[in-house]
Structures are given as C-alpha cells and as structure tokens.
Amino acid sequence: MSFPGTGRIWMNGELVDWPDAKIHIASHVVHYGSGVFEGARCYETQHGSACFRLDAHLRRLIDSARIYRMEPGFSYAQLHDAVLETIRANEFKACYVRPLVYRGYHTLGVNPFPCPVDTAILVWEWGAYLGQDALTNGVDVRVSSWSRAAPNTFPTLAKSSANYANSQLIKMEAMSDGYSEGIALDVFGYLSEGSGQNLFLVRDNTLYTSPLSAAVLPGITRNSVMTLARDLGFQLREEMLPRELLYIADEAFFVGTAAEITPIRSVDKITIGQGRRGPMTEAIQQAFFDIVTGKVADRHGWLEYVYPGEPRVAVGAGKTAAAQK
C-alpha cells in the first residue's frame, strides 16, 4: 500500500504537511542507519479510536534510543501526547503509528555524536500486513539463508533502523523465491523470528516461542500473545527451539504490530498441521481481536482512547490511561 501523500507529520515538536516533512540528504541516518523507531496501531473499537499498548511501544522506543546513546529531546509524556495529537490532526479512526528518533544533519563520519537527535511521528492507514486473507488461510514461508545477528554484534533488543537491513535481506530472498515471508535462525542455528515478526509454534497442545537470547526483538504483540495464552489456559514454553520443530509443528503463526496474528500454513513447502489456521492459533487470534475491537472488556488496560469524549478508561480495565504508564 503506497502512501497517500497527504496529511500531517509531527517533526521535532511541530506538525508539518506531508510533502514538507523532509530531511537533508547528508543526514547521518541516511548514510549510517543511525535511527530507532516504533510501530504501533490505533484501532477503531466499538467505543472509539484507541491505541494498543502505546505506553509499551514508547518505552521500547526510549530504551532503543538509550542503547544507541541517543537522547531524544522530548520526554515520554511529550512523545505520548504527540502521538495522540498527530492521529487527531489526521482525523484517523484507525491507523499505523511510526515514531522515529534519528541522527540528523551536521557532519558525516562513523562518529554520530556531533549530529543532532531529531524526532518524528508518522501515521497512515495500513491494513493487514500480509493480506486480509492471510489472517484466516495463513502464509507460505521458508527458512532464510540469512541469520540473525550474533551476540555482541548488533543489539537485537533495540528496534534499530540498521538492524532492518538484515530483515530486508530475509524478506527479499523469500519473496524472490515465491514465499510470503522468511524465518531466520540465530547464529547457533536455533529458531529466531521472521523478518519483522515474532514466531510461535504449537506441538501437542503446548505453545512454544524462542527466548530473547535467540536474537529476538522483545515484541509488544509477542508479550500480549503470551499473556492471552495464559488467560486461555494454554501451556506456554519459552526456550531455544531447533529448526526441525517447524516441520513437525501442529500449528505455527507470526505475531507483530503489522502482522498482528498471522497463521503459517507451510514452511519450506512442508505443510504445517492441516495447512490452515489451527484451533490454538484461532483462539488466540480471536482473543486478541476481541480486545482491540472493543468486543470484550480490556481487562489488561491495553487500550487508550484518542479523541475527547471517548472513554478515557479502557472498558473493563478499571484504570485510567495515565495509570497504565
């Protein structure tokens, strides 16, 4: 889906028109990938427009910036208010939210310290990342020939622009070979994650996912799925997983802000389970969408409403948006 080229973007404290949201070609981030970012969603619920776990996303943004020794010029509270301001300025009922902290224009060289730290927030309408049909019928994927970063090379706990060069290689390889996505192994050959999604497997009614030590981004949706799985009474194990577990899994699915919860129907042309969304995947998927659409009480306080006059308290959560932080 291409950008419409209209609307407003928040840049360093000011809303600017979409065509005017520009940086200099000599900005440090262009040459060295010196940026960190987030991806969050605002959903149109039965009770109004609500951001899903905005507090957790902004905390991870600030954590990523700290790892890369970038000090945003705005506090958590200012960034939080700026996200809501940008959604309102664009009058979106539902959208994808992309805050970005990056090294701007001053000088070039590997040393980034002389360059200013700039901040921007984009919002746009973005549907199902892998297609609406994929949410039900699943996607075909392959194990990538590209591995995730080895320990002490790139910080995989940070959602860094530079890290996504690796993701692009995984994605392009998969698509060039006719697959929707790729699954990366870590440097030791254990399952890591997709190009931009965390991975879950089901075997004998047990849900498995790789630990953060397997070069896995600490996904907000990943954490949410683990919480929902426990709510549903599923057995959950977080441990190092061998590649071959993919081929004998009863179910497999991707999770992420963009992908939401997308079933995997085959890996390396080996059918997973019955080749369609399995019962555990469907139960978790339904529990997730029931919350983000407002069909059931937001018992975890994950939703924060955007527009004045809409509920300030997530329905059934029993705590205000401010308390979530």
Image (cartoon, rainbow, N blue to C red):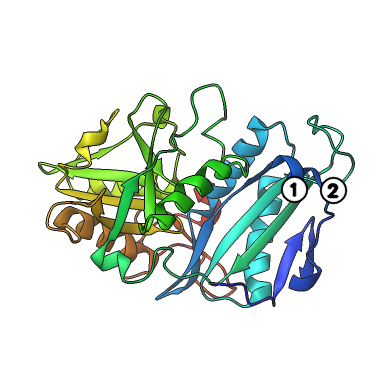
Q: Amino acid at mark 2?
A: Ala
Nearest to the observer: residue 161 or residue 208? 161
Query: In the rendering, at what x and y percent does residue 156 appear?
Result: 52, 33
Q: Which residue is mark 2?
A: 26
Can residue 196 be seen here? no
In the rendering, at what x and y percent does residue 318 appear?
40, 56
Residue 235 is left or right of residue 53, and the answer is left
- Quickly name the residue at label 1: 30
Kindly report the distance in space between the C-alpha atoms of the residues bearing marks 1 and 2.
7 Å
Q: Residue 213 bears which disc, if any?
A: none
Which residue reaches farthest right?
Answer: 106
Q: Quadrant of residue 289?
A: bottom left
Q: Residue at x 89, y 39 (%)?
A: 107
Badge 1: how crowded within 10 Å, few (<14), some, or many (20+)? some
Asked if labels 2 and 1 touch by Cβ distance under 8 angstroms, the answer is yes
Indicate whether 87 appears above or below 189: below
Relative to 135, is 73 above or below? above
In the image, residue 268 lies at what x, y percent? 26, 48
What element does badge 2 sit on? loop
Residue 258 coordinates in the image, percent (x, y): 46, 59
